[in-house]
Image (tube, helix red, strand yellow):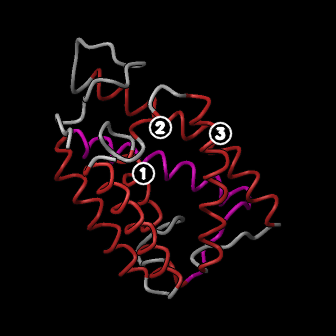
Amino acid sequence: MTISVLRSLVLYYMGWFGAIVFASRGEPELATAMIGIVVLFGFLKGGLMEVYLGTLAIMLGLAVENIFLTIGATSYPESSYLSWSGFVPFWMLLLWPLFMRTLALGECLGWIRGKWVIAALLGGVGGGLAYLGGTKFGALEFPSSQMYSVVTIGLAWAVVFPLTIKFRMFFEASLFNPGKSTMNDSTKNLDSGDTE
């Protein structure tokens, strides 16, 4: 395991746990600050490309999380919202660019690029379990049955995970590295040459 992969793994879980713990304690400001610091670190490390990809991730997250709320797969306690946030708590939306960053080559999930079946399986299992973990801390709730929510979220993430990888690879290749056809090439480092 390289230093950058280990750093990525530590930062991801530091951001995820920090956001979940503070949100569950009714401190959405601290949850947002915790995840925001980690996301900002990713933006600084990844440069302009990471800012664009992070923005895309927030838009994708806003759509997916609002669907989960609309179909009754998730809900959030009132205490987990900032006073100005909308339907989805802001700390939850910031988890999306954090996740997007882990998919860069040289980061903890960079190895999964191009492995679509594994990505779908990992998304399907890991997605539902991550949200279930959030409920155990009290940062979010399953308003319907736990089975309905975990299965629904898992099925969604079986699609969302590979789709997010595809988005990242497409934008890296077309916007930030034009002329390289790298949609299925997971051996080239398109992410700022970071090979620690």
Task: Please tell me which residue lies in front, 42 or 57.
Answer: 42
Q: Which mark is residue 99?
A: 1
Q: How many numbered circles are shown?
A: 3
- Describe the element under mark 3 as helix, strand or loop: helix
Q: Residue at x 72, y 60 (%)?
A: 73
Q: Circle 1 sits in a helix, a strand or a loop, which is it? A: helix
172 is within the stretch colored magenta: no
Relative horizontal placement of residue 57, taking residue 174 as reference (left or right): right
- Does the CB distance between marks 1 and 3 fall below 8 Å? no
Question: Mark 2 and 1 residues: CB-CB less than 8 Å, in contact?
Answer: yes
Residue 121, disc = 3
Q: Which mark is residue 164?
A: 2
Q: Nearer the viewer, residue 70 or 125?
A: 125
The x, y position of residue 47, in whole percent, is: 16, 44
Q: What residue occupies the far front of the structure in this picture? A: 1
Q: Give, as a single range, the part of the protein colored magenta.
A: 49-78
Secondary element at image label 2: helix
Whichever of labels 1 and 3 marks the residue nearer the N terminus, that label is: 1
Screen quadrant of the C terminus: top left
Task: Name the amino acid, label 1.
Answer: Phe
Of badges 3 and 2, the one in the foreground is 3
Secondary structure of the magenta portion, mostly? helix
What whole-number distance in Å separates the C-alpha atoms at marks 2 and 1? 9 Å
Q: CA distance from mark 1 to mark 3?
A: 17 Å
Residue for point 61% across, 53% down:
127
Residue located at (21% from left, 27% from top): 176
